[in-house]
Amino acid sequence: MSAASFSLKTTASPATASAGSTTSLVSNAAAWLRTLHRANPVLSWAGWLNVGLLAVALVLLPLDTRLVTGSLVWIKPIKFCLSIIAFVWTLGWLLADLPAQAQRSVRVLSWGVTLSMLAEQVCIFVQAARGTTSHFNIASTFDATLFQVMGVMIMLNTLLTGWAVYLVWRHRPHGPAGYVWGVRLGLLLFLAGSILGGMMIHLNQHTVGAPDGGAGLPGIGWSTRAGDLRIAHFLGLHSLQVVPLLGWWLSRRLPRRAVLLTWLGAAAYAGLVVALFQQAMRGVPLLQL
């Protein structure tokens, strides 16, 4: 079963939809995960490994009151677990729609992504356990070595993403035209969002106009007193989910105009990412509280 042919829409009848909505949602999610595991077991297991790490971090969160850059020490591992789960499962789902001649490349790419994400998570969890920052930390030889390892893994994952972009443009994914262009443009914008992360490495911090840490939006920590490059980076990365979903929805609702509207939607999304990046580079916060 291809990703494009699988619908998350509930099949419950109107009479039982309300009572069985939760059961239907769980059933659909389970079916989605089984389909993903058959299509790409490597990225499926990579996601489940991060589900396990997420559970560990959630257990430790209320037990460890140490603060790193103003947040509880296990907040960052939790955010990275959620981000990586969304990334690897979405990537596995989208690449499953490529034709058979591309699947050997998909398998190699999947192992590379899994390796890079696992290595990065090891660094993040080790530094969280030590009560210090993982990114931009060169305070000691050990800290600098871990940060360099993370940099290499990020570069590897960016190169593999570039390969994925090539594959979806070289080989037409299965599905209607709007969805196909959503996959292509979503991966392309994801690659651009990944490259935006290089500016944070160049600056050796994610805020512009103030040191990292300090006042931030609840839960996500985006700075409320300086520019924060994580916002544009976040939106760029999640184009991987938003743009293909837009193309899929438009293909169902407006099939004749789906391609044009998907391009326009992707262009608007890219414009928003660029605007948020420019705002951060001027040192202006998203919300100044």
Image (cartoon, rainbow, N blue to C red):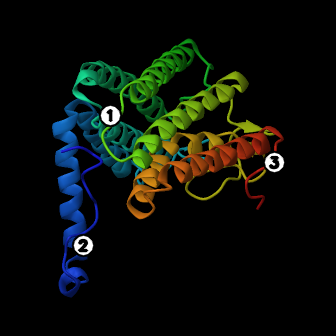
Crowd tier of the residue under label 2, counting other residues whose Cα lies within 10 Å: few below 14, some 14–19, many 20 or above: few
Residue 65 vs 218, above or below: the answer is above
Image coordinates of residue 270 in percent, x first then y, are 64, 43
Mark 1 and 3 residues: CB-CB less than 8 Å, in contact?
no
Mark 2 and 1 residues: CB-CB less than 8 Å, in contact?
no
Image coordinates of residue 242 in percent, x first then y, are 48, 50
Name the amino acid, label 1: Leu
Name the amino acid, label 3: Val
Q: Is residue 73 visible?
A: no
Q: Where is mark 1, residue-wise? A: 95
Image coordinates of residue 158 in percent, x first then y, are 50, 23
Q: Where is mark 3, residue-wise? A: 284
Name the amino acid, label 2: Thr
Q: Which of marks 1 and 3 is in front?
A: 1
Crowd tier of the residue under label 1, counting other residues whose Cα lies within 10 Å: few below 14, some 14–19, many 20 or above: many
Residue occupying image coordinates x 23% and y 52%: 32
Mark found first going from the N terminus, 2 or 1: 2
Crowd tier of the residue under label 3, counting other residues whose Cα lies within 10 Å: few below 14, some 14–19, many 20 or above: many
Q: Which residue lies furthest to the front in this view?
A: 256
Image coordinates of residue 175 in percent, x first then y, are 32, 45
Q: For the C terminus, which image quadrant?
A: bottom right
Mark found first going from the N terminus, 1 or 3: 1
Q: Which of marks 2 and 1 is in front?
A: 1
Residue occupying image coordinates x 47% and y 31%: 130
Q: Where is mark 2, residue-wise? A: 22
| Residue 39, quarter of picture | top left
Label 3: which secondary element: loop
Q: Distance between the residues labelled 1 and 3?
A: 37 Å
Q: Distance between the residues labelled 2 and 1?
A: 29 Å
Residue occupying image coordinates x 33% and y 26%: 114
Q: Which of marks 2 and 3 is in front?
A: 2
